[in-house]
Structure formats: C-alpha cells, structure tokens
Image: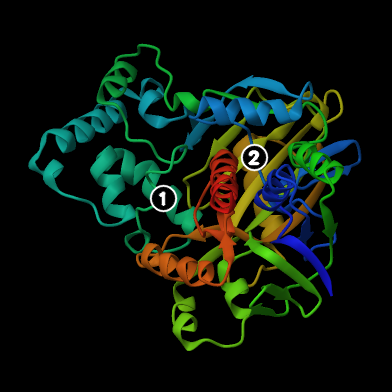
Amino acid sequence: MIEVDVIVLGCGWAGILAAYKLAKYNATVLCLEKEQKPGGLLRSEHYRSFVIDIGGSHVIFSKDDRVLNALIELLEANVVRNARSSFIDLGGKLIPYPIETGLYMLPPEDRFEAVKSFLENMLSQYRDFEPKNLLEWIYYAFGSWIAKNYLEPYNRKLWKRPLDQVSLDWISIPGRLPLPDWKEVIKAAVGLPSTGYKEQAVFYYPARGGIEALFNSVYEKALSLGVRTLTNVSLQSLKVVNDGVIVNNTFKARKYLINTTPLPDLVKAFERDDYVAAYLEYFDYNKVVVIAVGVNRPAPPHHWIYVPDERAVFHRYAWTSNYSPNNAPAKRSLALLEITVQKNENITRDLTARALRDFLKLTNLDEDDIIFVKTYVNEYGYPIHTLKIKEVRGVILKWLKERKIISIGRWGSWTYWNMDRVYRNVEDTVDNLVERRE
C-alpha cells in the first residue's frame, strides 16, 4: 500500500494545480492519471513542425487581474500578448465579436432590426420577466434579432440539447455570457468604435509549446516539490476507512482525496449507494471533436470564428497559428475546428470529411491548400448544465465531502469553467483545507 497525505485524481489543469499548491504546504502528494500522458484538455501535440492543441482553442484571459497576472507569471518569459481579432460568421459576412459591438458591420436593415428588437425588449414590460432557462435568457438579454440569427442557433450547435432544458447557473460565471450594455449597442449601431467583452479583448498564450506549456510550467514546479505522478491508472474502486481513503486497494490518502475527474465516474467507483446513484442520471455532457487542419498558406488576421449556421458541422474554428507564430512554420497556418457530440452518440467516419468540406467553403480555400488533417476526440468536453444540475451537484459534493473527498475543477465541480476560474477554485479550496488544519 502506497500512503501519502493527499491523492489527487486526474492530472489535468485542476489536478496539477492542486498537487502543486498542496506540495507548497509540505504535503506529500500523489497525482493519478488514467491517460498515458497528463494534461487533460491542455495537451498539445507536435506534428510536422506544427503545434496542435488537441483539446481545442484555449487562451489565457481573466476578469480577475490577480489571477491573470498569476497565470502569466507561470509562463515566465514564454508568453505572447494578442489583441483579440474574433468574428461571427453571419451568412458569409464576418461580424466583429461580440455581436452587440459589431453591429456596424451589418447591412442597414439588419442593423435596424437588431437594435430595434434589443431596445423594445429592454424597454418593455418583458423586463420584469425572470428567465428560467438558456433560451429564455437569450431572448431576454439580446432581443429577437440577435437571438434568432446568432445566439439561438449557435447554442443549439454547441449544447446539442433543447435550450429550454439548459439552466442558467453558468451564465453568471465571469468570462461566459455577459449582459450587453445598451450604450455599447447604440454606439456600435451608429458606427462608433467600441470594445465589447473587455476582459478578453487582450489575451495571452505561450510563445512556444502550445497551451500545454502552461500546464507544463506547473507540472515541473510540482515535481520539483516532490509531487509524484502515475499515468495509465484508471479509477477502479474507492473505500473510505477511519484513517483515510483507499484507491484501487493500492493507494491511500491519509488526509484528503482531491478529485478532478468527472463526478459520475468518481461516484461509480464506490460500492453502490442507492442514495447517490439516483442522482447520476442528471449528469450530462458533450464530447468535443477537434480537427486540426494544416494549411499551406498564411492565415487571415483572425483568431477564432463563431459559426451559427447549422449547415456547418462545427460551431467554431480558430486560427491558432495566430496565437503564436511558433504554432506553424513560416508562410503556413493551422486551424482547429471544434465539434460537440452528445455523450451517447457515435462519431461517424465521415465527420472529418464533412468538417473539412465546410471549412473550405467558409474560408474559400482549395483542397490543394491543405497539408494535413488530424482528428482528436476528447470524451469529456463540455458539462451540460441541465435544469436540476445545481441541486444535484450540491447533494453529490456534500456527500463526498463527508467522506473526506473534495471535488474541484471543471469536471470535479461539473461547472463550465475557464482556466482562470479553475485556478481560483483550486486556490480557494487548498487555502481552506490548510486553514482548517492549522
């Protein structure tokens, strides 16, 4: 039996942060990872002189300056700063993102309808209405034109669920869907310059190594403090005993077990408990398929493009060679196409071909411009915020905490968080654990 103070399940972004921060408090930490390589959705692959972020487009930004500075400091000198150049593809026309500050690019008739429906909604008695799901919130916050032409079809593509079955508990998370400012909408409509979503107007990214360089910066620091990591370790069983928690009948956490793996997988590792088993049906998620396309010409001056057109199979594509010039060879470029797939849906063989066909159509590229196409399937891409998930999540997390198991991160908390929010969650959790023991 291998015994340590703390076992961390999952060695992705949340897991390595927790291991590192606990080790700074002199805890002995073992991080167990089921994959062959740690990193989770922050893994990058070097392929034919390209650097591919296999978990999709990830950038560093935050509304919290302290957290943003901490993330940048982790990279030391290995960082580049970018002014966001992102768009929404509406009928083949690229509208600057976010749409409420890019209205000046719409034809006059559409611009009028967008502003008219936004203001009518804001000034009407409908403002007293309290939205209860994502579909209602979209119309409530943006009016019917923006909802019908952009946010409703885009979110249908992303979530792959009826939007009236998606809850609102993720909307208030910093960095997700901020409410539009009516003054900014009017400025954009009359053609005055405006920068929406200001915390993401500038973003950062590793200069070399892809987004995995951010993970590696913490991983190396954790190892230097004595953190041990084991890969290819699947979670088979959990047993709570008087003096700790035993994992797979092989590893023992004397003080705490920190979980960053998907909550349902964790619960299933216990001997069947009918009380919590009844809640598992409410946990839903989407896989994310990432298709990397190497292009034999420079990228346009764009970072990422949202594609609400439901005829295109992907909801977003990103020119990640513009995140850092080291992500692709000179005069070549790299795009990542992102597709969500429901958890029980099979990924068909023609998905990559369909995505490439749509990409060529949207970008006016030819097949002769394509150097390679590689497809990556991430089983856990997006947690779905079902209508009952807040209540259910609270029950499960409390049940785990009573057993000395703390569950954190995007998947351990089953919350649609960005990297910066995961950083805060881990930091707060570790600080609370240490203060409690002192």
Q: CA distance from mark 2 to mark 1?
A: 18 Å
Residue 246 image position (x, y, % from top left): 72, 75
Looking at the image, the residue that sits furthest to the right is: 48
Residue carrying label 1: 170
Residue for point 44% across, 38% down: 174
Task: Give the vertical position of 96 relative to 227 (above or below).
Answer: above
Pick whichever, 327 or 88, lies toward us: 327
**Which of the two discs, 2 and 1, sits closer to the camera?**
1
Label 1 Cα neighbours within 10 Å, binned few <14 / some 14-19 / many ≥20: some
Which amino acid type corresponds to the residue marked 1 in the rendered image?
Trp
Residue 180 image position (x, y, % from top left): 32, 31
Residue for point 82% across, 35% down: 209
Looking at the image, the residue that sits furthest to the top is: 192
Task: Give the vertical position of 55 relative to 296 (above or below).
Answer: below
Pick whichever, 71 or 162, lies toward us: 71
Residue for point 47% across, 37% down: 175
Residue for point 57% across, 88% down: 272
Residue carrying label 2: 58
Figure colour scheme: rainbow
Which amino acid type corresponds to the residue marked 2 in the rendered image?
His
Give SS at disc 1: loop
Looking at the image, the residue that sits furthest to the front is: 438
Pick whichever, 115 or 322, lies toward us: 322
Residue 17 image position (x, y, % from top left): 68, 46
Residue 66 visible from this viewpoint: yes
